[in-house]
Image (tube, grey):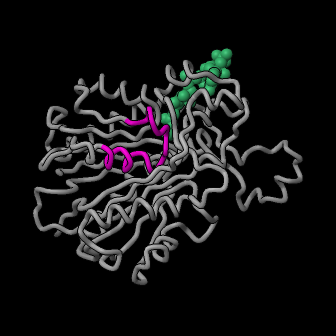
Amino acid sequence: MYNSKITGLGFYVPENVVTNDDLSKFMDTNDAWIQERTGIKERHWIPDGSEDSSAIMGAKAARIAIERSGLTSKDIDFIVFATLSPDYFFPGCGVQIQDMLDMKTIGAIDIRNQCSGFIYALSTADQFIKTGMYKNILVIGAEYHSNGLDKSTRGRGVSVIFGDGAGACVLSRTEDNNKGILSSHLHSEGKHADKLIVASPSIKNWVPEIIDSKGKDISYFPYMDGTFVFKNAIVRFSEVIMEGLTANNLSVNDIDLFIPHQANLRISQFIQQRFKLRDDQVYNNIMNYGNTTAASIIIALSEAWEKGKIKDNDLVVLAAFGSGFTWGSVVMKW
Ligand code: UT7
């Protein structure tokens, strides 16, 4: 059995920065509330007229990751693309990447697991490498939230937290069993699907029906029961981190860097306090990017790596929780 490790990573966010003060120009919100409740100072939103989309941002991040891995796009054997905001209802973004990066006619799949999408994507890629089927897999997380948000005061409880962006990594085969992904742990609890959801358009409620409702049906905007999601997040985050550590006979003290999905700084801080982690053991960047859902962990991982915060042999733990509900963790030795 082989092992898999990240050999290159990178991220891309649109240049356009939207501050909390900018948001208060079109909805009843303010910088103090957003910072106190979420930790977010600003996010990047694709501006009107830009060519960027989830697939295009994913391709930009992927080019950086592939170059840093020392490979070319022709060396990639498979694509795993995590997003909840694909360019098309179908086909998925993964196949667009195959074309945009002029790759061989390799397989491509999209993962639709929202905030834990990147954990699911990484875990999926890891299994293909561990079994020996593929050598180099491109794993992408990308989200284009800003065009789908309710930017009126009605949507302020949800819309202020989301940002656009993409991250990517190349996961490659290694025969060193002490390096790379040690284990991944995935969970779901579908009975809470309606607590964080974009319900339409769906085949059950297609576009003409929404138009017929003359503005009454707003189920195409994200809905979140924020308090309920928050409470579940802190429980599931804690469980799945411990599950990952226990599976590898490790303890919290062994963690060199913990990168949580950037949902809300208060969730990250709660986990940090619960596990008594020092500030240098946790990486957060939600302040500058907001919640980029499937992109958040890989953007944070890339940025932490670029800042030199991850060294050879470091134990890195990734964990996420979100819509579905779905949650998961990845434990890796850098
Ligand atoms: O990433 C996937 C998983 N997602 C999460 O884990 C997110 C989990 N939930 C959260 O992060 C938080 O619940 C939110 C940040 C979304 C909301 O924070 P909250 O502390 O739960 O606020 P709330 O929704 O309970 O609202 C408290 C008050 C309300 O006013 P009243 O009823 O107390 O008068 C809201 O109307 O704050 C008001 N409010 C706002 N005020 C200013 C809600 N949103 C805003 C806003 N600006 N943007």
Q: Position of residue 134 (x, y in %)?
A: 28, 75
Q: Main secondary structure of the magenta part?
A: helix
The correct choice, above or below, for 94 with respect to 226 in the image is below
What residue is at 31 percent from the left and 40 percent from the top?
259
Q: Position of residue 316 (x, y in %)?
A: 22, 44
Left or right? Give the position of 118 relative to 185: right
Is 287 inside the magenta-drawn segment?
A: yes
What residue is at 56 percent from the left and 58 percent from the top?
52
Quarter holding residue 276: top left
The correct choice, above or below, for 132 with respect to 115 in the image is below
What residue is at 18 percent from the left and 51 percent from the top?
334
The correct choice, above or below, for 189 with respect to 120 in the image is above
Q: Position of residue 36 (x, y in %)?
A: 50, 19
What residue is at 34 percent from the left and 58 percent from the top?
122
Q: Can the viewer see residue 227?
A: no
* Quadrant in which ligand 1 is drawn: top right
Which region is colored magenta? 285-303
